[in-house]
Amino acid sequence: MSRATRPAAGFRRALGHGWLNDPLGLLLLPFLGWLAVTGLVLFVQLQLGGGLWMPLLAAHTYAGLVVLPLAAAKGLAGARSGLRRLRQPGRRGLGPGQALTGAALVLGLALLLGSGLLMVANVPDAGWLKTVHAWSALLTAVPVAAHLVRYLRRSHRVTRQVMARAEPGTAAAGVGPAATSASRRGVLALGAVALGGWALLRGGRTVLESRQAAGPNDFPVTLTAAGPDQPDPGSWRMRVTGDVATPLEVGLEELRAGPVERHRYSLDCVLGWSATRTWGGVPMQELLDRAGAGQELLSVVVRSTTGYEVALQPATVRDRRTLVAWEVDGVDLTAEHGFPARVMAPDVIGEYCVKWIDSLTVVTA
């Protein structure tokens, strides 16, 4: 075997013999606990109708990105180890309870991490993903707890074997130089997995954020659903439709004809960055008033030219700081930041600040 193939072969042996199983489980445990606690707090905040605490949301998101490669490696290590044990003479297969727990754990984690990753990527019409994310968290909690109990019981048994090995004249089965060597290899392989996870996380941020522009537009450009768009300002039109007396359609010149209102607050991204700027535009409520929208407002659905859309709540819409904005710190937004017009609103996550507005649809029922 060449030197180039030895590390890969060693890693495969570590997976096959289960040397990574226990270290990966120990490393995953605090991250899963953190995800459970922060997810529960964020869920309660949403149910109470309050604003989400952005640092907590960012910490929840990054923990999920770290868990993603670790969970994949843990699943692969467990599967390879289980297959190896089944091939040994005299070994019985998994019992019905253990098989069901394992299947529920794999399915729950796949749904949980997959839906979370899609929400970070801002896929279109993603409201259903939040429901999937919440229910998959509940589905995963029970098998994770059962898996942890089984792991603690096995750890207790191994500890007793080690203590017996330490007593003069006794020997514990499976504990000795070979096991010590396996542990060292497992730690080294775990380090390689952690390094790969860190590289994946850094690479993911590079994909999600483009280079920053100079001047007031020097905050990160996070990709949105369906990719970026650059509508022609000369032909761009924005419609105000739905439950209104007179549907409205305006172009950029009409939008900028009136007085500009400017408000200073932060744009907070779920990826963890925040940019405090002075945003300029026209209050969304003024456009709704021009179209004859009533006071009995359920939501306003903001749609982008890319097809991405979100629903803004009445309290956000009626706040005069919520703008259909085209400038930042006195200069025009760049096309990457949503020019000709985007939503800017205080105390909401960046995913609600829709770029390249196509329409505002008023919903009252």
Image (spheres, helix red, strand yellow):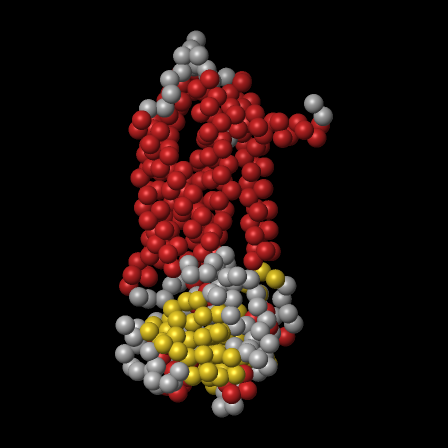
Q: Quadrant of the C terminus?
A: bottom left
In the displayed structure, 199 sits above or below 15; it is below
Residue at horizontal 51 percent and vertical 24 percent from the top? 17
Going by the image, does 76 lie left or right of 102?
right
Q: Position of residue 176 (x, y in %)?
A: 50, 17
Going by the image, does 211 lie left or right of 134?
right
Quadrant of res 297: bottom left
Residue at horizontal 55 percent and vertical 49 percent from the top? 201
Q: Position of residue 292 (x, y in %)?
A: 35, 85
In the displayed structure, 290 sits above or below 69; it is below
Residue at horizontal 40 percent and vertical 47 percent from the top? 112
Quadrant of res 7: top right
In the displayed structure, 215 sits above or below 186; it is below
- Residue placed farthest to the right in the image? 2
Viewer can see residue 142: yes
Residue at horizontal 55 percent and vertical 27 percent from the top? 14
Between 62 and 226, the residue placed more toward the observer is: 226
Q: Position of residue 230 (x, y in %)?
A: 59, 71
Q: Quadrant of the N terminus?
A: top right
Viewer can see residue 262: no
- Residue placed farthest to the top in the image? 169
Q: Position of residue 238 (x, y in %)?
A: 48, 79
In the displayed structure, 80 sits above or below 90; it is below
- Residue placed farthest to the bottom in the image? 258
